[in-house]
Image (cartoon, rainbow, N blue to C red):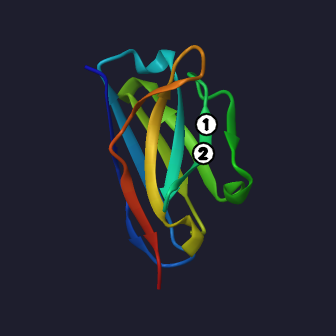
Amino acid sequence: EVQLVESGGGLVQPGGSLRLSCVASGFTFSSYGAIWVRQAGKGLEWVSITNSGAGATSYTDSVKGRFTISRDNAKNTLFLQMNSLKPEDTAVYYCARANSDWDFDYWGQGTQVTVSS
C-alpha cells in the first residue's frame, strides 16, 4: 500500500523556520518525483517540486530563496526546509508522489503550518 506521511508542522512566529518531512512507503521512492502543495482556504497552491534524484527542483515565486526542497532516497523521505516564514505561508502542507506522467497520484494527509505572532 502506497503511503505518504507528513510531519513537522506547527505554530511558528514570523521569521522563524520549520522543516517538514514526508515519509514514503509501499513503493520505490527513489523512482518518483515529488511535490509539496499547500492549501489555505479553498485553493491549492504548488510550493516546490523535485525529480526522483533531486537534481532538478523548482519553486513557486513566493517561496524562492526561503524554502528548500530535498530528499533522502535511502530513508524514503522528502523534506521542505522553510525559513523566514511569513503569515501568508500559513496553510496545510501536503506532499504528493509524481508518476511518470507527472500526475500526482498519491497524497499524504497534510500537516498544518501556522505562522503567527
Residue carrying label 1: 49
Residue ID at (56%, 22%): 52
Quadrant of the drawing holding the N terminus: top left
Q: Is residue 87 left or right of residue 107?
A: right
Residue ID at (40%, 24%): 74
- Give the image location of residue 77, x and y in percent: 40, 34
Q: Callout 2 environment at 10 Å: few (<14), some (14 to 19), or many (20+)?
A: some
Height in image: 92 above or below 75? below
Q: Secondary structure at mark 1?
A: strand
Q: Secondary structure at mark 2?
A: strand
Marks 1, 2: nearer the viewer: 2
**Disc 2 marks which amino acid?**
Trp
- Give the image location of residue 102, x and y in percent: 59, 22
Q: Callout 1 environment at 10 Å: few (<14), some (14 to 19), or many (20+)?
A: many
Q: Is residue 68 visible?
A: yes
Residue ID at (71%, 54%): 64
State the residue in front, 3 or 39: 39
Residue farthest along the left direction in this orientation: 1
State the residue in front, 99 or 28: 99
Q: Is residue 86 visible?
A: no
Disc 1 + disc 2, Cβ < 8 Å: yes
Height in image: 31 above or below 79? above
- Give the image location of residue 7, x and y in percent: 33, 50
- Give the image location of residue 71, x and y in percent: 50, 34
Count of all numbered marks drawn on residues in the image: 2
Residue farthest along the front direction in this orientation: 42
Q: CA distance from mark 1 to mark 2?
A: 8 Å
Residue farthest along the bottom direction in this orientation: 117
Residue carrying label 2: 46
Residue ID at (65%, 59%): 66
**Disc 1 marks which amino acid?**
Ile
Kindly identify which numbered label has been placed on residue 102: none
